[in-house]
Image (cartoon, rainbow, N blue to C red):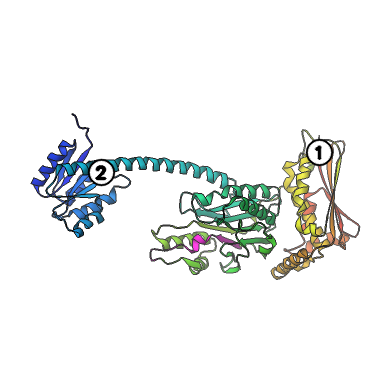
């Protein structure tokens, strides 16, 4: 009967008699054999001949069997190459040392052919099983790579690409439980969210898809950041199992680059960094539970307004950054992070932090996902307004006919509802003006904010003349909104058709005391950087803007050519 060749056996023994006996026994098992007389020769032959099994004597000159085994096992990688020690020693300590060096089994001299045959068959079964597992692992790894690619494209493929945004996730595994999401709202505000699901890996990453869907759908329609977080929380509360939750940081940078609205729920502090000297100006601590824990959240409780100056930086990160450890089991920590920030060049904070982190951790295995984001607050961070001349818009298939719509929001409804997305989306349903979504949204937002803040709430925009007053303004706004059970804002919308022109009339009336609109043109140039730009922006976006009554009625016209 022909014995199938199982490969090459390497015999390592400084005694020629022992090699000859073992060679004869292995030939009967179908093996080709090669021989070495010491550990160094064994290492060299392993490199050149790639044997399928090794029989290693323990006591040899130059390099003994223990050291040779350690070196060979270190280079086998995922390939299983069994090493059977050959020894005359039978004490437990010696045999245990064989196993600790990486040996898979041992044979006591003199050799018994039946025991040799049994051990070879056992090693062959283990090798076959190892090869099968390796194949399965390779297939799973490939599927994970494909899934990761699809996952990243689906989650992050629509994120903003801007040279003033430095952001990355370093996952601890194939999949990350951290996530980054960014988008511009229709009014050109920058929404930037980082999140951290419980744990890491595939199970933690599964919640990222619904979060991404809610985030992008709601921001594209112009919902407020608080409404976006409420929407995400409802989705996660419905989907996540008990014990799994989502820490989140959300920053909304105002399109005028005047302020940022910040939410922190269950995440490390966010930092506002002075762009002139890299000093930390302000910290924004977590003010609420992570999302997915309770059914209802009040985003106002976790929101914080801050005035920003040109070149300021907003730093966001997950706890995987500060909790990263080095080989001495020390934590990177907040002190090292702050030293990295203050020691960096003005435009090198992001790179400095990662440089310090890599130097600190060395070759230490990463145990948690690490996310870091730096937003550089300069004008090019935000998109410029699209100054499309509405008179030159020609619609190929304009919807004809007039329509009117009236919406009234009173008392607490003003606190609970943002009417702007409702109105803009309704206009776009009635008119083919998708290309003008941004201009419509921005103009109606400014009209509504003026009506609510200065009309109903009676806030004085002069408070925003400096950063301190700016903070007072929004604190007062928050307080008055919480107690709001009076006043109203009414929207009267209409479409009018002329011979070659179509017009949308936006009439917004509030219940406030109005203002001296007859003088606003003469004083508009005196507005400070932190206030007074709203009317100018509306005038720039619309074809006309006028006021009636005591200044509490604003009427804007938006026109375009139809032929």
How far across and down, in percent of the image, does residue 231 sit? 67, 52
Given the current orientation, which residue lies at the most extreme top position?
1
Local crowd size for mark 1, using a 10 Å CA cut-off: few (<14), some (14–19), many (≥20): some
Looking at the rendered structure, the secondary structure element under dot 2 is helix
Q: Nearer the viewer, residue 151 or 244?
A: 244
Q: Nearer the viewer, residue 308 or 64?
A: 64
In this rendering, position of residue 240 left or right of residue 532: left
| Quarter in which the N terminus is drawn | top left
Magenta stretch: includes residue 323: yes
Disc 2 marks which residue? 123
In this rendering, position of residue 392 left or right of residue 50: right
Residue 392 visible within the image:
no
How far across and down, in percent of the image, does residue 194 sit? 58, 56
Given the current orientation, which residue lies at the most extreme right position?
549
How far across and down, in percent of the image, does residue 176 sit? 50, 52
Against 439, residue 290 (above or below) is: below
Q: Residue at x 43, y 60 (%)?
A: 358
Along the polypeptide, which appears first: circle 1 or circle 2?
2
| Quarter in which the C terminus is drawn | top right
- Report how far apart the C-alphas of labels 1 and 2 lie in the structure: 83 Å
Task: Give the residues drawn in magenta, as a range.
Answer: 312-328
Q: Which residue is drawn at 82% across and 47% down?
A: 543
Looking at the rendered structure, the secondary structure element under dot 1 is strand
Q: Quadrant of residue 115?
A: top left
Disc 1 marks which residue? 561
């Amino acid at each position: 009967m022909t014995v199938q060749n199982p490969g090459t056996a390497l015999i390592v023994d400084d005694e020629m008699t022992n090699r000859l006996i073992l060679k004869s026994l292995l030939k009967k098992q179908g093996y080709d054999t090669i021989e070495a007389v010491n550990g160094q020769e064994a290492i060299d032959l392993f490199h050149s001949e790639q044997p399928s099994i090794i029989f290693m004597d323990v006591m040899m000159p130059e390099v003994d069997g223990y050291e040779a085994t350690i070196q060979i096992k270190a280079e086998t990688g995922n390939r299983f190459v069994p090493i059977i020690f050959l020894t005359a020693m039978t004490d437990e300590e010696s045999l245990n040392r064989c196993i600790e060096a990486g040996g898979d089994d041992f044979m006591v001299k003199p050799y018994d052919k039946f025991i040799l045959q049994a051990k070879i068959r056992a090693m062959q079964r283990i090798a076959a099983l190892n090869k099968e597992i390796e194949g399965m692992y390779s297939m799973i790894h490939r599927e994970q790579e494909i899934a990761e690619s699809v996952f990243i494209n689906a989650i992050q493929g629509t994120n903003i690409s801007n040279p003033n945004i430095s952001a990355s996730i370093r996952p601890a595994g194939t999949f990350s439980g951290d996530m980054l999401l960014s988008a511009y709202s229709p009014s050109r505000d920058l929404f930037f969210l980082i999140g951290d699901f419980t744990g890491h890996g595939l199970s933690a990453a599964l919640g990222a898809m619904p979060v991404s869907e809610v985030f992008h759908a709601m921001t594209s329609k112009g919902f407020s950041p608080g409404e976006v977080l409420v929407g995400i929380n409802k989705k996660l509360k419905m989907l996540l199992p008990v014990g799994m939750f989502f820490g989140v940081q959300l920053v909304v940078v105002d399109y005028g680059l005047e302020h940022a609205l910040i939410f922190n729920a269950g995440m490390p502090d966010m930092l506002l960094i002075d762009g002139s000297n890299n000093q930390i100006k302000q910290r924004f601590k977590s003010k609420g539970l992570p999302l997915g824990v309770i059914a209802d959240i009040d985003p106002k409780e976790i929101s914080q307004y801050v005035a920003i100056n040109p070149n300021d930086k907003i730093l966001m990160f997950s706890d995987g950054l500060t909790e990263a450890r080095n080989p001495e089991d020390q934590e990177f920590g907040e002190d090292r992070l702050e030293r990295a920030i203050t020691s960096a060049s003005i435009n090198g904070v992001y790179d400095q932090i990662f440089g310090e982190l890599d130097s600190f951790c060395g070759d230490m295995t990463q145990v948690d996902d690490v996310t870091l984001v730096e937003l550089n607050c300069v004008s090019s961070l935000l998109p410029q307004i699209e100054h499309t001349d509405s008179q030159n818009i020609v619609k190929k298939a304009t919807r004809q006919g007039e329509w009117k719509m009236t919406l009234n929001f009173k008392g607490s409804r003003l606190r609970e509802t943002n009417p702007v997305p409702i109105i803009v989306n309704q206009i776009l349903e009635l008119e083919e003006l998708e290309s003008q979504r941004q201009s419509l949204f921005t103009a109606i937002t400014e009209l509504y904010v003026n009506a609510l803040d200065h009309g109903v709430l009676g806030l004085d925009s002069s408070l925003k003349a400096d950063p301190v007053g700016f903070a007072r303004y929004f604190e007062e706004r928050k307080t008055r909104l919480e107690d709001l059970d009076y006043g109203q804002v009414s929207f009267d919308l209409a479409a009018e058709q002329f011979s070659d022109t179509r017009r949308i009339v936006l009439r917004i009336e509030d219940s406030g005391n109005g203002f001296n609109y007859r003088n606003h043109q003469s004083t508009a140039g005196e507005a400070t950087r932190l206030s007074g730009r709203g009317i100018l922006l509306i005038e720039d976006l619309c074809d006309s803007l006028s006021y009636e009554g005591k200044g509490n009625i604003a009427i804007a016209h938006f026109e375009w050519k139809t032929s």
